[in-house]
Amino acid sequence: MAKIFLLIISVIVMVSSLTVQAKSQSATLKLDPRVALGTCKGLVEDHLGGVLRTARVIALTSEAGSAKWESVKPMLDRFSNDLETDATVWFALPDGSYFSTETGGISDQNLKDRNYFPKLMSGQDVLGDLVVSKSTGHRSVIVATPVIVNGNVVAAVGVSVRVRLLSALLDSDTKLPDNAYFYALDPDNKIVLHRNVDRMFKSVSDVGDESLGDAFKTIMTKEQGVFNYTLNGKKMTSIFTKSRTLGWYFFIAQERK
């Protein structure tokens, strides 16, 4: 078990170091929009991918396999404390009941009605599902992996990453030209990440109009490109690229003068 615990710690350190490395690189450059776009996508993919890798390592331990909160809690507390986005880590059982590092114990909520839960209980990872967290009320991205013992799913290790903090991390670490900003959309045109907190988890149509939502749907059939549009009377130009890992579309936008 000592070796496994050391491996867990090393993975956690790796998750943190990925962000630190990206920080040091971006801090020395004033990025042009195309470089910034790749940096934004890379930072998010590295952070969420690192979270999933650590969750997988924890899921392999005997502590997680015991399906007992008291056994796995020290690992999950350490995991939560070391995440730069201050995420809530949770431990779910097959009946949907769960424990979280936010409450320090069992929640009075249940995850069985979450869209991702059947997938998780069937033995598959979850990466990038959007929810309003039941334990915290925060708009969050779900990263989770099943705990499998003798071919059966006995529990799951999950993380609710706050989109507000993930957006703030990108905002501080990415050097953009003046009057430029980033955002990310999921395949349903829901705004996942944005500098403007009030826009997150709204659809494009909610912040613009129905025709704008249709225009975004059209261009999001491509892997990458340039997209000019009008938002609230302002003429905008943007470049975008799709994350194959998350299925999200990342944009860098700037007002056209």
Image: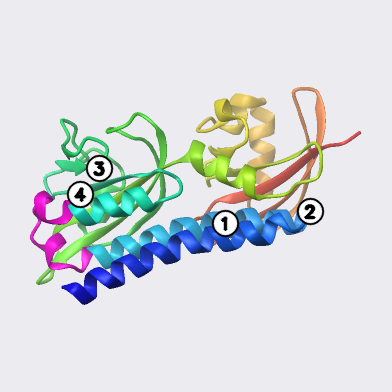
Q: Quadrant of residue 51?
A: bottom left
Between marks 3 and 4 in the image, the one whose residue lies nearer the viewer: 3
Q: Quadrant of the N terminus?
A: bottom left
Give neighbour class at mark 4: few <14, some 14-19, many 20+ (Cα, 10 Å). many
The residue where tag 4 is placed is 91
In the image, taking residue 167 as reference, residue 12 lies left or right, namely left
Q: Residue at x 23, y 38 (%)?
A: 113
Q: Residue at x 39, y 32 (%)?
A: 138
Q: Does residue 200 show up magenta in the picture?
A: no
Q: Main secondary structure of the magenta part?
A: helix
Whole-Å distance between the Cαs marked 2 and 1?
A: 16 Å
Disc on res. 43: 1
Please, what is the three-letter code of the amino acid marked with disc 3?
Answer: Thr
Between marks 2 and 4 in the image, the one whose residue lies nearer the viewer: 2
Name which of mark 3 and mark 4 comes first in the sequence. Answer: 4
Q: Secondary structure at mark 2?
A: loop
Whole-Å distance between the Cαs marked 3 and 4?
A: 9 Å
In the image, taking residue 52 as reference, residue 200 lies left or right, namely right
| Callout 2 touching callout 3 (CB < 8 Å) | no
Q: Residue at x 22, y 35 (%)?
A: 103
Highlighted magenta segment, given as a residue range: 59-73
Q: Does residue 68 show up magenta in the picture?
A: yes
Q: Is residue 239 visible?
A: yes
Q: Is residue 245 visible?
A: no
Please, what is the three-letter code of the amino acid marked with disc 2?
Answer: Lys
The residue where tag 3 is placed is 101
Whole-Å distance between the Cαs marked 2 and 3?
A: 38 Å
Name which of mark 3 and mark 1 comes first in the sequence. Answer: 1
